[in-house]
Image (cartoon, rainbow, N blue to C red):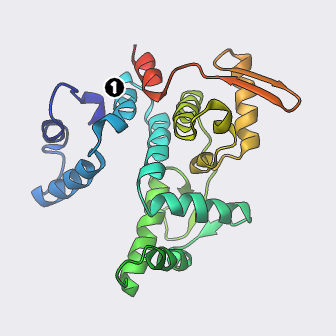
């Protein structure tokens, strides 16, 4: 849908053109359109991702970029990945079932002071969180038992992450140690090593001398990068 997006047209017309006739029933199409429409409340915010899709970026790399955006903008998924799934992986967890996510879901509902959630609601939310993480490449497995993955990032996806995280953190230097790399299960040491490799290929300018670090970003922001890829 994004690869055929027309920035000169309305969101609703783009949705109608991109989703029309793609589903078995009108009810399911309406459900999908409603979900996507909510994610497009601020089209300018997601414009870099639309532009990357229009540029012909591989689906795998694009999905990884989209995963970062979902982590930043959607709750409780963002908290689940950044605070629970990442930490469990660091503790050595290898596999996970929905039942094991129930305490997290219950705690989130209590912390947000929302209305009481039913037992069915808890397990359904836990399943949805695992399905989303699976669809976005953080988990593998076709059964109810999911395995934690190490998704890795292609060079283009990494540069997009670097630029968007730098925008959020307010500087390139802060981006290296940012917790938002958790969305790809990357530790600061892995970010550092990737930057060193990309520096060798002149894709970034990353100078390290002892405790002194200088990182010059190759583009002004994530949108500039997406537009350059498209060009």
Q: Secondary structure at mark 1?
A: helix
**Picture coordinates of residue 224 (x, y %)?**
44, 21
Could you say which quadrant of the image residue 26 lies in? bottom left
| Closest to the observer, 87 or 31 | 87
- Tally the numbered discs: 1
In this picture, residue 134 sits left or right of residue 191: left
| Residue tagged 1 | 54
Q: Residue furthest right?
A: 210
Q: Residue placed at 49% from the left, 26% from the top?
A: 221
**Picture coordinates of residue 133 (x, y %)?**
49, 57
| Closest to the observer, 58 or 118 | 118
Q: Residue placed at 52% from the left, 50% from the top?
A: 137
Residue 141 in sight from this viewpoint: no
Quarter of the image that includes the C terminus = top left
Q: Residue placed at 36% from the left, 38% from the top?
A: 45
- In the depicted structure, whether residue 32 falls above or below residue 110: above
Residue 88 in sight from this viewpoint: yes
Q: Residue placed at 60% from the left, 62% from the top?
A: 83
């Amino acid at each position: 849908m994004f690869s055929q997006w027309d920035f000169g047209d309305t969101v609703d017309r783009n949705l109608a053109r991109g989703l029309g006739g793609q589903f078995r029933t009108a009810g399911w199409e309406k459900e999908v359109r409603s979900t996507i429409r909510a994610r497009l409340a601020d089209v300018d915010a997601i414009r870099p991702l639309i532009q990357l899709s229009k540029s012909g970026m591989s689906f795998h790399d694009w999905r990884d970029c989209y995963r970062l955006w979902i982590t930043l903008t959607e709750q409780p998924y963002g908290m689940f990945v950044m605070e629970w799934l990442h930490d469990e992986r660091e503790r050595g967890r290898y596999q996970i079932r929905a039942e094991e996510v129930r305490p997290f879901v219950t705690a989130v509902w209590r912390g947000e002071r929302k209305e009481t959630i039913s037992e069915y609601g808890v397990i359904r939310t836990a399943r949805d969180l695992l399905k989303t993480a699976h669809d976005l490449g953080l988990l593998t497995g076709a059964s109810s038992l999911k395995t934690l993955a190490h998704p890795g990032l292609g060079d283009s996806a990494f540069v997009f992450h670097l630029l968007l995280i730098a925008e959020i953190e307010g500087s390139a230097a802060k981006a290296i140690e940012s917790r938002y790399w958790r969305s790809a299960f990357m530790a600061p040491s892995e970010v550092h090593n990737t930057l060193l490799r990309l520096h060798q290929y002149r894709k970034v300018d990353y100078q390290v001398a002892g405790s002194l670090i200088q990182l010059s970003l190759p583009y002004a922001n994530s949108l500039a990068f997406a537009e350059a890829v498209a060009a």
